[in-house]
Each structure stands twice: as C-alpha cells, then as structure tokens.
Amino acid sequence: MSYLLKVRHLRKSFVRGGGVFSDDTKRERFTAVDDVSFEVAPGETFAIVGESGCGKTTLARIILRLIDPDDGVVLFEEKDLLAMKGKVLRAQRRQMQMIFQDPFASLNPRMKVGDIVAEPLAIHEPERSEVHRLACAAEMLQRVGLDAAALNRYPHEFSGGQRQRIGIARALILRPKLVVADEAVSALDVSVGAQVLLLLQELQKEFHLTYLFISHSLPVVRQLATHIAVMRAGQMIEYGPANMILQKPTHIYTRDLLAAVPEIPQPGQV
Amino acid sequence: MAKLLCVNGLTVQLPTAAGWVKPVNEVSLQIAAGESLGLVGESGSGKTMLSLALMGLLPVGARVSGEVWLREKENHNAQGRSSQRHAEGENLVGLGEEEFRSVRGREIAMIFQEPMTSLNPVMRIGAQIAEAILAHEPKMEREKLHHRLLSAMEHAAMPEPVERAQQFPHQLSGGLRQRAMIAMALAQWPKLLIADEPTTALDVTVQKQILDLLDRLRRELQLALLFITHDLAVVAKVADRVAVMYAGRIVEEGPARKVLTAPRHPYTQGLLAASPTLEKRKLTPIPGMVPRLTDLPPGCAFAPRCSLWRAECDQAVPELRTAGPDHLARCVLI
C-alpha cells in the first residue's frame, strides 16, 4: 500500500523556560515530540488528539516544514521531505496547506478577502495574471459557500464561520494533497462549527484531500476521522482505525480521555 | 421554596452607531439556593451581558431596566444597609456603584473563562485571595486572614495550599488557576456564583475535575450556581435546569433532562442536532447565522433560520408558552 505521508521516529525537544535572565547552562530540555511514527494513506482523515502540551501542534509544524525536528524521517509520497531545500521545497509546499484555529487572527485585516485567498497563487504561480488569480479566488469562495462579492471586502466584515471558510478557500486554492487542520472548529459556535465540519467532508470528497486533523475534542474528531492517534507528553501512545480507538481503546489514558468527555443525554436514557 | 435569585424582565440596552440594541431583552429567571441553572447560548446571544448585569459590571453608558431580587443571606449582619432591605431582599437594579461594591464578591461572585487574564500576573496567589477577603473586611487580623485564606483554598480543593499561596499565576496549570479563581470567588461565602464558560479553555480531564468541584460546592455550601456555556454536554453535567438564550431572549427553559432530551423550541432542537457527540452521526447544522442585534427580524428572532417557519412567526415575538411541567418555550407551535 502506498502512503501519502510516512513518519518515522520523529523527535523534537525545546529548551524549557529561558528568557533574558536565565542561565543557559542550566536550562533543561523537554521533548515535545518523542519518537513518533505513523503513516497516512491518501484520502484518510488522520486525527491527532491530545490535551494541551501533548505535542500535537509541534508534530504538525514539523510535517509542514515550519520547524525542523532533531531526528527522524518524514516521507511525502516516498520523497524525503526533510531533505528538501530551495525550489524543490517551495514546490512541495503547494501540496501541504494549513487551516488555522483562530479565524480572527489568521487573516490579515488590511488585505481584501480576494487577495488573501489568491495569495498562495501569487506566490506559486507568479506568471499568471491578477485577473486569473482573482477569478480562481472567486470560484473557490463560491465553493466554500461565500458570495463572489466577498472578494472586495475585508475580513472584519465577516463572522467567525465565514472567516473560517475564507481560510479554507485559501488553503485549497492550490489544490493541495494534504491539508493540516489545527483545531479548525474549536473557536466556532456549535451551529457554525457543524457547518464547517460538513464543508470539510464535502471538500475532501471533491478534491481528494487527505486531512491531518488536530483537535482536543473527541466528539469533533469522531465526526470525520478515519484514523485516530492519541498523544500524551510527546508520545503517540495509541493509534488505529477510529472505531477501534473509540470502542476498544487499549491504553488507559485513552480510556480516561473518553471517560472525561461530558455527554448529552439521549432520549429514553434514564 | 423561595428562590434566592429572582430576575424579572431584565433588559440591558447598549448604545451603538446604529441605535440602541438590547443584548438582554426581558429576561426572567430564578435560582434557588443549592440549585444550578445552565444558561446556554452561542456568541452574541446575550448570556455574558446578562451575567455582567447581575454583577453590576455593565459597560459605561448601558441602560438597565427590570428587577433583580437577591434574598437575604441568613444570619447576615449587614451594617448600614439594613434600611434598604425588606422581605424579598433587595433589588440590585439601580444600585449605585458604591452600594454594588458591597454586593459584588460578598453576595454574588463570578469566575471567568480564562483564569490567566483574570489573575494578576505579578502578585502571589495567596495575596490575591487575601485581597478578595480584605476588600470586604479590611480590619481582619493576620492570623484570621491566613486561616480564611487556607480554608478558601481547601474548599477549591487546591493541593498543598500553603505552598500554592506563595506561587505566582504562571507557576500554576490552567486547572489550578481556575481553582485559585474559585477560591477567590468563595472567599466571602457568596450566595450566588456565576460561572462564565469556566472550563472552555481547559483540557477535558481537567474540565471534569472542575465541573465535579463546582457541583460539590454548590451542594455543600448551598450555592446558587448560574453556569453559562455554549456546550450542551457540559450543561447536561452541571445543571438542574437549563435556559436557552437566543438574540437576547430566553427561548426555552425547563428541567435539564427535559430540555436536552425533548426540546420544544426549534433552536434548541437545532443546537442538539449540530452538537458533535461520541456517537458518529450525521450532524445537521443550523443554516445561516445568529442575527445582528441591530438588525433583528420583526417577529421570532430565529424565524429566518427555522425549518418550521410559517407566516405567523414574523408577526410578533412569541410569548414564552407552557411546553410541559415547569417547561417553557417561546414558539408559536406550542
């Protein structure tokens, strides 16, 4: 079976504390990502769950080549992602895009929505005309449920859910293979969050996307994950098909996490 | 049993560029001592503005009308304020800042979503809790103060209270910071505790601990708890009764189990259908978005998003109607 993403023995540690007054020689290191290995097949939604500080965001940042690991291998379609440099890396970045948590902080308030959504094209296809770029942006905005008139407006004119759609349009305009969604719905209201989750599901089918879906919320993950990995203190303590992890968790921490999730009572339940 | 808190027709108006808006519109609710009311709503529903009104912390320029009655604490010796008091307690609406200061903290306390922004980063935890005590009893002796401080921290189940009291907020985890906030809120033995999304920023295992703690405290201390959240699953865990707010009004209220398993208002039904659970199921989002307060529809505020809409919905804002025993819903279909 061919994998889109293959991660082997990934490791990353940071210096704890620090700051201007600290003594460099005494700094401890802590391991944010500790010997993590997994693979993701095309079309899967691979969810990484864990509590704050478990290393899930650091892991995603390494895979997107935003930070370098201390050790380990990441293969993207069998190519060594960590060895890529310069033009090769830049070309690779088109294949991996990200959707952020905070739709208020992740859009430049001084840019028009059209320019925000078209910016990846401006970077990766500078030879194309601006007219072409904006036409692509308009099409993408419509696909995520926004009016093409949004092109000439600014982010502050939109609600949280609409901004998240703008962020999704920007992530998908290059037609990436892998989309990393880091807490993509946790800042949204319940009714709007459900809209965005359904949109992500539709777009996955339409554009054959593979998702690396990072979340602290098991109920959210439940709705679209095909695979779930549970992280704790930098380690991936358990991973497998979503049904297995949720119904027959083997690790006690996974069981604790599941037990702590508050549940809405179902009709008929006493 | 007489209710501890009675809110009658509370309305808050705020000035905006587009005129006055009502983030809290004719809200009535009651909470008994030892009871917990879950107030559910999405952003912009008015739930936080309601809690700020109860705390007397509304922004400058806000207009408030209606009544907020808070019953006397038993054996409470209120010096200098007895003249304004009568059998029902006192009406907090219209109290001046000076008068409100003796209510806030002492009778009504509040905890917030992000404890880090509510705590002073350059002040030790113990000193901050002591400050909450001294604010109302400035002449307390050192020894007694220390005792009160530790007992407040013990109530909030902070491990190693003596050591923790010496620490700064950044040295505590998120869960411990929220416990420090709870200790501070309980320092004066208030009658009513308002918790505004107190666990939203916390990890799920820590959330469970804080919810369990709040649940125990309200039983042990006979606290009335107003628990504000957007999360229906959290509300199911902490609330005896649930009130659902939409665009400034309560649209449904009733026993928690009834509201969550047999909701009568289409908005509550929609929220439940949109909430992810550990069961895999098809989520049904509510179409559209929460209306702006400057641009409310003429009738039911939910009508433009409602799948059961009919012409009648646009004629007038529906009254709260009886939807079952102790269960109200603001919908023409009932």
Image (spheres, coloured by chain):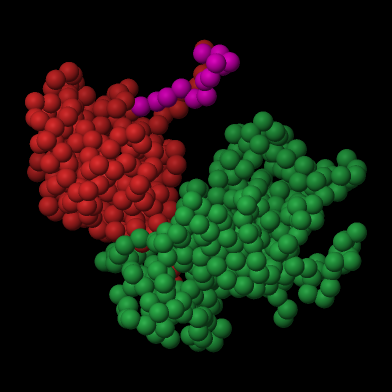
Chain colours: A red, B green
Q: Position of residue B34 (x, y in %)?
A: 68, 70
Q: Which residue shows up at 87% across the image and 61% down it?
A: B81
Query: How many numbered discs?
Result: 0
Residue A19 is at least partly visible in this image: yes
Q: Which residue shows up at 28% across the image and 38% down it?
A: A112
**Apparent side of residue A122 relative to residue B127 in the rendered image (left or right):** left
Magenta highlight range: A12-24
In depth, the one of B274 and A131 nearer the eye is A131
Report the magenta stretch's main SS: loop
**Apparent side of residue B51 relative to residue B200 in the rendered image (left or right):** right
In depth, the one of A10 and B281 nearer the eye is B281
Q: Which residue shows up at 62% across the image and 55% down it?
A: B62
Q: Which residue shows up at 17% across the image and 29% down it?
A: A122
**Apparent side of residue A192 relative to residue B324 in the rendered image (left or right):** left
Q: Position of residue A241 (x, y in %)?
A: 24, 53
Q: Position of residue B73 (x, y in %)?
A: 80, 67
Q: Position of residue B139 (x, y in %)?
A: 90, 44
Residue B149 is at least partly visible in this image: no
In depth, the one of A64 and A2 nearer the eye is A64
Magenta-span inclusion, residue A219: no
Quadrant hosting residue A193: bottom left
